[in-house]
Image: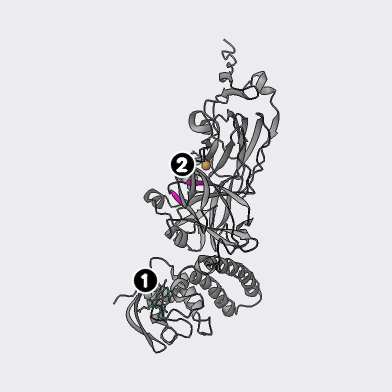
Amino acid sequence: MKNPRIPTALAVAGLALAAALATTVIVRAEGGPSDPKGPVVLPPEVLALPIEQAILTSPPHVPAPIKRKFSARVVVNLEVREVVGRLADGVEYTFWTYGGSVPGSFIRIREGDIVEFHLNNHPSSKLPHNIDLHAVTGPGGGAASTFTAPGHSSQFTFQALNPGLYVYHCATAPVPMHIGNGMYGLILVEPKDGMPAVDKEYYVMQGEFYTTGKFGEEGLQSFDMAKAIDERPPYIVFNGSVGSLVGDKAITAKTGESVRIYFGVGGPNVTSSFHVIGEIFDKVWPEGGMKYIQENVQTTMVPSGGSAIVEFKVEVPGTYILVDHSLTRTFNKGSLGMLKVTGPDNRVIYSGKEVDAVYIGAQAEAGSDSAKREAELKLQIADATKANPLIAGLTKEMQIEKGKQVYMGLCFACHQPDGKGLPMAFPPLAGSDYMLSDRDRAVRTVLKGLTGPVTVNGQTINSAMPPQEAVLTDAQIADVLTYVSNTWGNKADAFTAAQVKAIRNETH
Ligand code: HEC
Ligand SMILES: [Cu+2]
């Protein structure tokens, strides 16, 4: 026989009319990458639907609410790109992305829509990728139909049967590595009647990064499979990097406005205890389902590969901190974002000064200003090196800026932002004769901690400072000591990472 292949029958598994305007046609795409079935032959009532190009947004933005009251054929074009980006100040990472951002582009459709999905893998990619959308009813959530080599494009069609806020992610082996490199995002399937209107909508996702280096270790980091298997991520962050929602990148609102956050966890492993310091969630749609079943919630638990919608009205101006309330993640691994609310004071609801300014807002603000200054100095150094090898002065200034970020993230909580300490509890670093007179001892104090009576500027304190050797790198300790010994009127030479290393390794 010359041509044994008979054209495949319609890949249409079921057809039913649920409502006058909404066709519920299940289009099932099957087969692997080597077995494309060609575009599905859609029944006339589906072909009659209006065609729309989906508008995708990168975080923290969300596409506008859907106004139409009927189903449409929505065309989604999502591009996979492998890009080098910033994970933290001085730390780079090769992110694998949907649409160039972590999390990937936000997709917004309506219950009953027929979605023609195109997954395009950029020619510069090194690996094949696919997509599993939790909003899809069908094997692998689309993964089997979208395995796509670099420079290729896959297409499949599905109908959005269930409304909800769904995670999508790459499901190419090794799956935890693809997700761990940033391949996740959210797709919102609005219910037929739409979501209630609010003033502001934002898109935030938590995910963890298993870098070979420790938190803050500079340079280009790569994925560490052993740490992933042990679930020991150095970074747990919102929207793909430390500080992605901090300073001038904070999300914003005005007093009196209602704010809705579409919050998801890409993981690949770690569950979030999502909380906003200083706010109470008026409404929560837990687990990304479409019933808001809880009110007045402080912290909502969001599983890996899951989501929640939270909504609250902001009454009082100030800075509100988004955290994973498993707080070492926030203070030591990066899961900290900010919501800045402007507007007139409301002294009946809240009378006082902004407590978070000293609490951690200051840390973030100082960190972000300081990071900018650091970037400027890096450029200056590059220029200066070209013209003049004598760059020691600038290097020290740079260490001071970096050290300030360490100080405002860690030491300030005890020694205070102004370095003056607290009487009877924490000794001063400003003008400290103890610190400035013995440099090795200062390094040893930070590395190994300090207990028992210590006299600083004539005042004796008998308390304990925790060791930082497991928390900070040699460079970070050199930087923070350079900062504290050259701030608040202090003056001293820069500390070097080599000096810290020697003391770290010393045996008694
Ligand atoms: C949890 C609170 C706490 C943190 C965080 C902390 N310290 Fe201390 N630090 C102390 C206490 C308490 C002492 C005094 C210990 C004692 O009584 O023996 C001390 C002592 C010191 C001293 C020697 C005494 C002096 O005043 O000169 C130095 C230097 C110092 N800390 C620097 C730092 C630096 C730099 C950091 C950040 C990397 C830091 N500390 C983080 C509580 C802290
Ligand atoms: Cu992938």
Say left or right for 160 vs 72: left
Kindly identify the residue that appears in the image at 47 percent across and 74 percent down.
478
Along the line of sight, the residue nearer the viewer: 164 or 172:
164
267 in magenta:
yes
- Residue 108 in the image, given as x and y percentages of width and height: 62, 39
Rate crowding at label 1 as few (under 14), some (14 to 19) or many (20 or more) other CA atoms within 10 Å.
some
Per the rendered image, the range of residues in magenta is: 264-273
Nearer-N-terminus badge (2/1): 2
Q: Residues within 10 Å of mark 2 (few under 14, many from 20)?
A: some
Q: Is residue 179 above or below residue 41?
A: below
Question: In the orientation shown, which residue stands out farthest toward the front?
Answer: 348
Residue at the far left in the pictured view = 508
What amino acid type is highlighted by mark number 2? Val
Residue 23 image-quadrant placement: top right
Q: Quarter holding the N terminus?
A: top right
Our reading of the magenta stretch's main secondary structure is: strand
Residue 220 magenta? no
Give the answer, above or below, for where 381 lies relative to 11.
Answer: below
* Residue 507 image point, x, y percent: 30, 75
Q: Residue 175, labelled with which disc?
A: 2
Q: Which residue is mark 1?
A: 467
Q: Can residue 120 be spotted in the picture?
A: no
The answer to whether one can see residue 473 in this image is: yes
Q: Which amino acid lies under the numbered mark 1 shown in the image of this protein?
A: Pro
Judge depth for marks 2 and 1 and give the one in front: 1
